[in-house]
Image: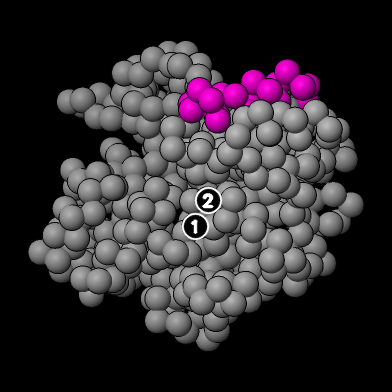
Amino acid sequence: MKVLVIGSGGREHALTWKLACSGKVKKIFIAPGNPGTGELGENIPIEALDFSALVKFAREEGIDLTIVGPEEPLVKGIVDRFQEEGLRIFGPNQEAARLEGSKVYAKWFMKKYRIPTAEYEVFEDAEEAIEYIKGKELPLVIKAEGLAAGKGVIVARTLEEAVDGVNSILVDKVYGSAGIRIVVEEFLAGEEATILAFTDGKTIVHMLASQDHKQVYEKDQGPNTGGMGAYAPAPLVDEALMERVYREILLPTLRGLQGEGIDYRGVLYCGLMIKDGVPKVLEYNVRFGDPEAQVILPLLKTDLVEIAEAVIEGRLEKQQIEWHDKKALCVVMASGGYPGEYVAGKEISGLDKASSLPDIQVFQAGTKREGDRLLTAGGRVLAVTATGDTFKEVIEKAYEAVDQIYFPDFHVRRDIGWKIFKDQEV
Ligand code: AMP
Ligand code: GLY
């Protein structure tokens, strides 16, 4: 069959890599893709939000299945558009994608269906928000309602930070229409974990737990990024906790969606805060995480096409989903300066050498090809993923591969996986 992947990041390279392992897939197209996906399939120069061109391409090329990587096309209704044309596509429709597209909606939904999450209020007026904040204990968390590429969340530890945060979103409109409203919520302490799940709207099946490393510097210091590294399966989420997540979060979310008459088919991402064994939802996303996909997909034994078809056709209950009994860890190599300003166009060397190491996949994100040179073209440039039998082994392997790669002013966190060992001797 012919498959189309939408997107151009490390997650989409990992999706393409996994699809390329499928015996069912004859050809993969990626729109727009990156040089890494171009080695596994054919990149098509169509942007992820150009729905008309994507639909036209899918029809003319006879695409059997389309898989959407990023949130923006989902929130803007790409799935509805493809379905109207009778094209098969994996991902939630526009109504379902509101769980990520509007934090106000997601909070309302969680409250209505008693899904554990932080207490919150919604504001449109900056002065009212500031009055409210003055009567509350700090820290508090301030979130722009809409999509802000992972940047619309401010953890305010002082009143000044809170006031600046409110004003930047509601008055200065730094996130434009994504910041017409804000959610102000209680700060939750604890440790974060990501639980991804497949759902066909009737059954929900969790994947392996993973952990992202959001902050740019070691020991989780500095501003949040899209993610500087990840690993799976996260030891923090043992069987008992996963059972609790299923009972208190995944199943009530599915029942809530059904209660709202929403037919959710695709991947659901639950960003959790866990304290003393109690999980609470920080956010929903409606797609694979990036870089979580780069560690989850290499551990997935079952053919992703089989699962995607079962989800689309509503037969997930009968679909086997198997995992390799291994660990995976990924280290993101970023442009120096990211998530702030950085200079792109730097030459990357050593990638072939790194990729040829055993149990290493180098997923490309912000890269571009110019002649036979590979250049940086984004904040997160590469996601170097190792698989192996122990976390100690995958950490060593991943950094060994990272050390083969060079581009001027690159930045990596040297401590990806540190939480695995924080309570014990290595
Ligand atoms: P979100 O996009 O809502 O997941 O927020 C991004 C990041 O901000 C999360 O991964 C957390 O690190 C942090 N965060 C969000 N909400 C809270 C909260 N209520 N308490 C503590 N940290 C939070
Ligand atoms: N790694 C966080 C996200 O994909 O939203």
* Foreground residue among 361 and 208: 208
Residue in the picture at 34% in, 31% down: 367
Residue 274 spot, x, y in % from top left? 79, 51
Q: Amino acid at mark 2?
A: Ser
Where, quadrant-wise, is the N terminus in this rendering? bottom left
* Foreground residue among 354 and 216: 216
Residue 284 spot, x, y in % from top left? 59, 54
Secondary-structure class at tag 2:
loop
Secondary-structure class at tag 1:
helix
Are discs 1 and 2 less than 8 Å apart at CB? Answer: yes
Is residue 177 highlighted in magenta? no
Q: Quadrant of residue 400?
A: top right
Residue 315 spot, x, y in % from top left? 47, 84
Segment colored magenta:
157-174
Would you name the residue on which mark 2 appears? 102
Side of 64 relative to 195 (left or right): left
Whether 90 is drawn above or below 17: the answer is: below
Side of 59 relative to 261 (left or right): left
Residue in the picture at 45% in, 16% down: 341
Residue 222 spot, x, y in % from top left? 66, 22
Q: Amino acid at mark 1?
A: Arg
Q: CA distance from mark 1 to mark 2?
A: 5 Å
Would you name the residue on which mark 1 appears? 98
Can see residue 324? no
